[in-house]
Image (cartoon, helix red, strand yellow):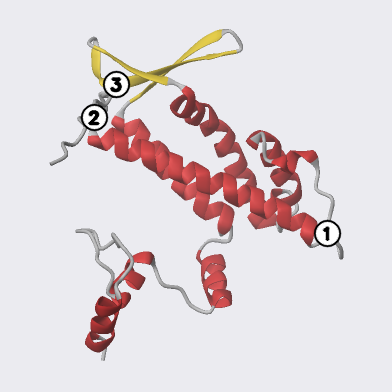
Amino acid sequence: MTTRRLKRLWDPQLSDHEVHFIGMIFIQWASLEHEIFVQTVRTFDSEAKEVPELPKELNNIQFTAVLELWKERVADAAPKGRAKVLRRQYEKILTLKQARDALAHGMWHWSPEDLGRIGTVRVKKRQIITSHFSAKSLGDMASDLGEINFKIRFPGGLIDLVRARMQEGGYMSRRAVAMFSGAPVDDDGYPTAHPTRTRARRARRADG
């Protein structure tokens, strides 16, 4: 009989709410960086008949360099109403970047003098930078990033969203696909594994 090795894990002293919002911030930020990069690359692809030579900013080493190129080639080049929306998102991204960097690169800590607040400490260019967050501020930041992600994709609002869905020829959410395919799901309806053939057949029978 083999015994399982006991794992000792470092405890960051974060609540479930704080962990949830921090995770959502990282997911939203990663989605944002990807969309900004893809939109910028497409502006070069549309100009050239052959494979275009991309500028060094699109080596994607520094996000702010890609962001500036996106503003120039996507936001500023958009029709007037949409350009206004996209420029506003550009400003919001720059405002939120410092907080995102603090979350991504800082060391978490808390103080007995203010238990409702958590902080991060990081060193940048020989300066010690301390930032503070509450669960509410983390939730607000996650929400703001979600809104930015929507608006950089659909600066015209619901009209742009509907047009995109029509061009795709239909859309199903991850939970809907799980339901119709018979995949095992959690309490929120999200799939926990790929459906087996037996489950898929049962789902098809139940659907008629």
Q: Quadrant of the C terminus?
A: bottom left
**Label whose residue precedes the other's in the sequence (2 or 1):** 2
Residue 71 versus residue 87: which sits nearer the camera? 71
- Circles 1 and 3 in contact, beta carbons < 8 Å: no
> In the rendered structure, which amino acid carries the disc numbered 3?
Arg
> Which numbered disc, 3 or 2, marks the residue closer to the eye?
2
**Residue at mark 2:** 7
Q: Position of 64 compared to 105: left or right? A: right
Whole-angstrom CA distance, mark 1 to mark 3, is 51 Å
> Which numbered disc, 2 or 1, marks the residue closer to the eye?
2
Determine the secondary structure under disc 2: loop
Whole-angstrom CA distance, mark 2 to mark 1, is 51 Å
Q: Residue at x 73, y 48 (%)?
A: 76
**Residue at mark 3:** 117
Residue 164, image x, y percentages: 56, 70
**Residue at mark 1:** 51
Q: Quadrant of the N terminus?
A: top left
Q: Quadrant of residue 166?
A: bottom right
Q: Identify whether 1 is placed above or below 77.
A: above
> In the rendered structure, which amino acid carries the disc numbered 1?
Val
**Label whose residue precedes the other's in the sequence (3 or 2):** 2
> In the rendered structure, which amino acid carries the disc numbered 2?
Lys
Determine the secondary structure under disc 3: strand
Most extreme residue toward the front is: 1
Q: Which mark is residue 67?
A: none
**Label whose residue precedes the other's in the sequence (1 or 3):** 1
Q: Residue at x 30, y 35 (%)?
A: 19
